[in-house]
Amino acid sequence: DMAAEPPGIPDYNGLEILSPMVRGASLPMRLCCLEYGAGLVYSGVTIDHSILECVRVQNKEFGCMDYVNRQEGKVVFSTCEEERQQLIFQVGTKDACLATKAALHVCGDVRGVDVNMGCTAPFSSTGGTGAALLEKPHVVADILKSLRRELPSWCAVSCKIRMLPTVAQTIDFLRLCEHSGADAIALHMRTTDDNRDKGHPARWDDLGLLCSEVNVPILANGDLLTRRHIDDFWQRCDAVAGGEGGGGSGPSCPRRRPAAVMVARGALWNPSVFAKAEVPYDEVVRKFISTCARVNNVHFATKWTLKEMLGSDSQKPAWLPVFGGLQGAALRRLKMELDRAQNMAELCRLFGVDHDASAYPPDAFNLDYGRRLLQSCGMATDESPVTVDGSSGLTAVVAA
């Protein structure tokens, strides 16, 4: 049972945080990042109505709390006690009422709730959520005020935004979020027009002024890809104490430092980016796979992350570590074998991770597992959406 009250609003000062990433910020990725030293972890964005259509299931088979869509029998969001005090649930929304109901549905299992205001993916922005909110300050104010008013005082309320077209507009938006009740603001140092894949760098030169214009903690995000980038950034902040940064391999330090930094791709490629000492990369990859098995991560989601770790993103620097130190034809063969892997057992075998399929319940690591989970607690899938009252929702328990 995950009903114990957490210790209150986080102290963001000096934290290094896993950024919310669709598909990337899965439960096993979050747990690995925490083990390697992340101060907080964000879930990937979940749309408000999607979580509201879920039944909260205490899954003792895997020690998780699963939110299962009753129509589709699919696990939409999964968490566990191990991460509860450091987990921020990110919601995609354009409506204060739905945002609040969604937040109340999950707040007992998380440390805080964050509103996605920066995602430019079509599924988000074309639906009026994500970065579309940057053009609707009155909606943003309504959402944040409602969340802060209705959520328990110990539950953090935050938002993740992008820079607006001008620094002045960005300052105005930061102030709006602060005055509407945000306990922290994560700031991606790119505008909606900046294209990371086309090499547009994060706008770090503007960060100092932005941090100076609000009192709320700013969590800075953008192009922190390696441990060296992160260390160089903090070292400049400590050294210049209000001056200008220079040299090194990462972004320069602002005049006023952010409270925390947020890491996305760097953590997806190597979750040990949060560790102060180097961890052998093969060990990191195998730890991720074994954690996926421990918490019932769907095998094709595990496979997707492994592809990212092996370098499917063209932006991944060639000098980052590679599993087994493989190069050229050997690396290409591993990628092809990964493409052909059909289940968790094959993934484990490919990377040398011990795995006994007979030790796991039927349909583990498959989408159909959620359907069996509902059936196990007498709640067969229903074509009618689940109605949630907001404060308690529907909860079922599956015994081990």
Image (cartoon, helix red, strand yellow):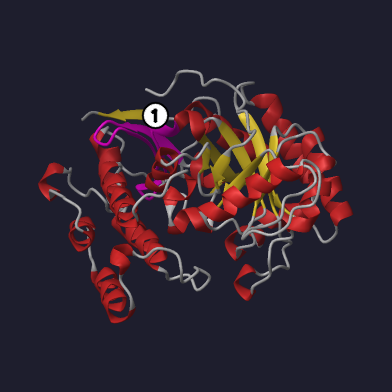
Report whether residue 116 is seen.
Answer: no
Q: Position of residue 361 (x, y in %)?
A: 18, 43
Amino acid bearing label 1: Glu
Question: How would you rate the neighbour count of disc 1 (Cα within 10 Å): few for under 14, some for 14-19, many for 20 or more?
Answer: some
As helix, strand or loop, the secondary structure at mark 1 comes to: helix
Q: Nearer the viewer, residue 116 or 224?
A: 224
Q: Quadrant of residue 151?
A: top right
Q: Quadrant of residue 17?
A: top right
Q: Nearer the viewer, residue 283 or 52?
A: 283
Whether the magenta-drawn stretch holds residue 26 is answered as no
63 horizontally vs 6: left or right: left
46 horizontally vs 329: left or right: right
Please tell me whether residue 184 is drawn above or below residue 325 in the rendered image. above
Residue shown at 39%/44% (left/top)?
32
Please tell me whether residue 179 is drawn above or below residue 115 in the rendered image. above
Whether the magenta-drawn stretch holds residue 70 is answered as yes
Q: Which residues are magenta?
A: 54-83
Please tell me whether residue 37 is drawn above or below residue 308 in the rendered image. above
Q: Position of residue 267 (x, y in %)?
A: 48, 53
Q: Which residue is mark 1?
A: 81
Residue shown at 31%/67% (left/top)?
325
